Image (cartoon, rainbow, N blue to C red):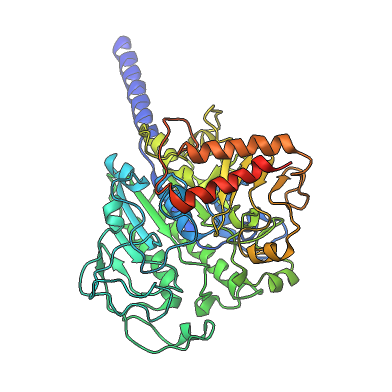
Amino acid sequence: MKYLLNLLVLCSLFACQNDSKETATTPPNIIYVLADDLGYGDIAAFNENGKIQTPNIDKMAADGMKFTDAHSASAVCTPTRYSILTGRYAWRSKLKSGVLTGKSKALIPNTRTTVASMLKKNGYQTAFIGKWHLGWDWSLTTDTLGGNGWSSTDFDNINFSKEVKNTPNDLGFDYTYGHSGSLDMAPYVYVENGKITAEPDRITVDTAKYTWWRKGPTGADFIHEQVTPNFFNRAIDYVDKSASNQPFFLYLALPSPHTPILPTPEWQGKSGLNPYADFVVMIDDYMGQLINTLEKKGLTDNTLVIFTSDNGCSPEADFALLGKQGHNPSYIYRGHKADIYEGGHRVPFVAKWPKVIDKGQTTDQLVCSTDLLATCADIMDYSLAENEGEDSYSLLPFFENRETENTRKDIIHHSINGGFAIRRGDWKLIMDAGSAGWSFPNPKQVAAIDTLPPIQLYNLKNDPEEVVNLQAKESKKVAELTNLLSDQILNGRSNDGKNQINDNFEGEWKQATFAIINKGFRSK
């Protein structure tokens, strides 16, 4: 009898060990929330002097891991979104600078692996909700597109009764719901699984700055003030109705706090600062609701939630007014959205995954928006092919508090005008005389001054504000970083693997790229 009891105990322990092992290897749900034009300093957990209260995102950081040296792959929207899904710098695609509009054709070919297609192949249900801004192909009433999508009435030749082609559904997403571009780009319609939900009302609007946004909907079901709440509510509903026997990946791409800056009436004035700050506070509250839904569903423990931004804060937030009240959306960093300076691409980045990430972790590891693909592949124990995630590094080792030799050592930054910079360790080399974006000195101002050094070199450890240009004193460091930049551009990848070919690497862009690189080689 004693032998039988011991045997039962051993069997019970073995079963428990097996259950534990099975639970430990259960793939997590993954939610990636991307804010639009949110500054590094706009989240209180990243800015000890900040004046915007963000308790829900701060709690995410306290319950998980905060990355203090995280960067978007570009200082503007479209290229960062490309990088998130593909694990590849967008300047390797046919988009070499700038952004797409609401009427642009699809940027990502259906043959390229995305985070969604990889996870779907590995048993995930996948969903996209929000602002796409990577182009899709509208059905037209004429042979040509007509217009460029910037005007508020620039949609006359779209056939809204027919389905849209080359949508997120063709890139691995089972369910998709969103709009094509930013909310200052036509057309203003929602598209759900390729079908347009309602045709826009063809009305005349007052194009004075922002005033027309409150003159009523420009679509039968499209009210600008309600877009962000709509997306959050649909994301919450998706989580609430998710299947219990299948992990999900949800990519929630917000159109806010990008212009038009429209916090809903109940949030107006809540920050005590300005409408932009009200908008950020509103986003934080909805993030709390999303996380609470996970808790109610019992999904918190094994759900990886990442919150970040697609680039730095836009000057439309009114830096001057916020500054008078003691708040800087870029924190201590120089510049803002569109710039090659840190304020253009250094972004808040928080990861929460209670099952894996210990509470209250902070890391200064260099990370990029390209890193989601390799992270998800690592979680799934999926080996990326040579032409998948060419600029992606896994964050899983940092989540698990273990060292790895595959840590990202460098990153390439890119501005709205196609300006390059490269960072390795404390050093950052900018292949431009100015911001390569919107802040002083912008390209026109650089041309007018005509006395600035053609490149800039900063030691971010000693000079995080990028004030003291060391390019003249550190010629060896300039040469080292120029060679590194050249190699990573020409090799078609920045991580280990077989060299790849950049898309459309020819003609004017190729010549312009070599001209940029040559600045470093010519520097003394």
Q: Nearer the viewer, residue 129 or 88?
A: 88
Quadrant (top left, top right, bottom left, bottom right) of the N terminus: top left
Q: Residue at x 32, y 42 (%)?
A: 118
418 is higher (above) or lower (below) than 259: above
Q: Residue at x 43, y 46 (%)?
A: 505
Q: Nearer the viewer, residue 156 or 465?
A: 156
Residue 441 seen in this snapshot: no
Q: Residue at x 75, y 38 (%)?
A: 474
Percent position of residue 198, x then y:
27, 76
Percent position of residue 24, x then y:
40, 32
* Image-based side of 296 in relation to 276, left or right: left
Q: Residue at x 61, y 78 (%)?
A: 269
Residue 228 seen in this snapshot: yes
Percent position of residue 60, x then y:
54, 51
106 is higher (above) or lower (below) than 20: below
Q: Nearer the viewer, residue 479 or 8?
A: 479
* Image-based side of 427 in relation to 227, left or right: right
Q: Residue furthest left?
A: 162
